[in-house]
């Protein structure tokens, strides 16, 4: 093969591989770290690393904060998640077109998560799940707290519960064991889901009921 032809072939192959890698990266990267205070960790494929500013976030990532830490991730559609101290969530789904969110599912395992969700047209497509609750929102701001090993204010016999407080917009909330039995929580109200019980009727926001250090 002529040296010039070989050089062009190598260049084309390199360009193709680079383009494929970039496309794969773009498909998996759904956001990035935009603010961090204290120490926060990322578990990706069993590897645990410290999170840093501008670090890309991918589907399947598990993020957690240590004591006195706070972490903000901004997603490609402009939505933000603020994770308070001693908390953890995973990015289960975040399907996008070029700039539009089609479906998002985040799973809060423990602690407090504030979601600032960019409005999208069509049916509500932003969900936050906890071990006992499911929340569906579109274009709103709300905070979810999942508390374990502490009596629920609504049912002192229950030692695990979810509280959802809405600051702007509307969120549909239900026990994950019966998602059809949802309550509609509007701005300035909150609901509590104790163990396997349905979500309580929305009541005015009460800061003390969100439960633990880290509420803001």
Image (cartoon, helix red, strand yellow):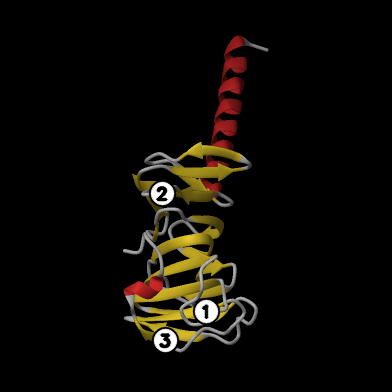
Residue beneath disc 3: 202
Asked if residue 110 shows in the view, the reply is yes
Q: Earlier in the sequence, mark 3 or mark 2?
A: 2
Disc 1/disc 2 C-alpha distance (Å): 26 Å
Above/below status of 50 relative to 155: above
Residue beneath disc 2: 67
Residues packed near mark 3 inside 10 Å, few (<14), some (14 to 19) or many (20 plus): some
> In which image quadrant can residue 90 be found?
bottom right
* Circle number at residue 156: 1
The foreground one among 2 and 120 is: 120
Counting every numbered tag in the picture gives: 3
Which residue is located at x 42 percent, y 55 percent?
A: 75
Which residue is located at x 45 percent, y 67 percent?
A: 145
Which residue is located at x 53 percent, y 59 percent?
A: 94
Q: Position of residue 165 (x, y in %)?
A: 39, 75
Residues packed near mark 1 inside 10 Å, few (<14), some (14 to 19) or many (20 plus): few
């Amino acid at each position: 093969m002529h040296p010039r032809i070989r050089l062009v072939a190598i260049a084309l192959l390199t360009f193709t591989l680079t383009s494929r890698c970039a496309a794969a990266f773009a498909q998996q990267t759904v956001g990035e770290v935009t603010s961090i205070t204290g120490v926060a960790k990322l578990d990706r494929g069993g590897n645990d690393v410290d999170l840093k500013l501008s670090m890309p976030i991918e589907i399947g990532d598990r993020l957690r904060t240590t004591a006195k830490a706070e972490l903000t991730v901004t997603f490609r559609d402009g939505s933000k998640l603020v994770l308070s101290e001693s908390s953890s969530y995973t990015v289960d789904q975040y399907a996008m077109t070029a700039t539009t969110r089609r479906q998002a599912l985040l799973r809060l395992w423990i602690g407090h998560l504030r979601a600032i969700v960019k409005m999208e047209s069509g049916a509500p497509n932003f969900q936050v799940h906890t071990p006992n609750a499911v929340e569906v929102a579109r274009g709103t701001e709300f905070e979810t707290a999942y508390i374990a090993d502490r009596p629920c204010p609504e049912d002192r016999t229950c030692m695990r519960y979810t509280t959802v407080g809405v600051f702007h917009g509307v969120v549909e909330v239900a026990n994950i064991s019966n998602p059809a039995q949802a309550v509609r929580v509007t701005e300035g109200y909150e609901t509590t889901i104790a163990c396997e019980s349905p979500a309580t009727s929305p009541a005015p926001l009460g800061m003390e009921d969100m439960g633990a250090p880290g509420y803001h």
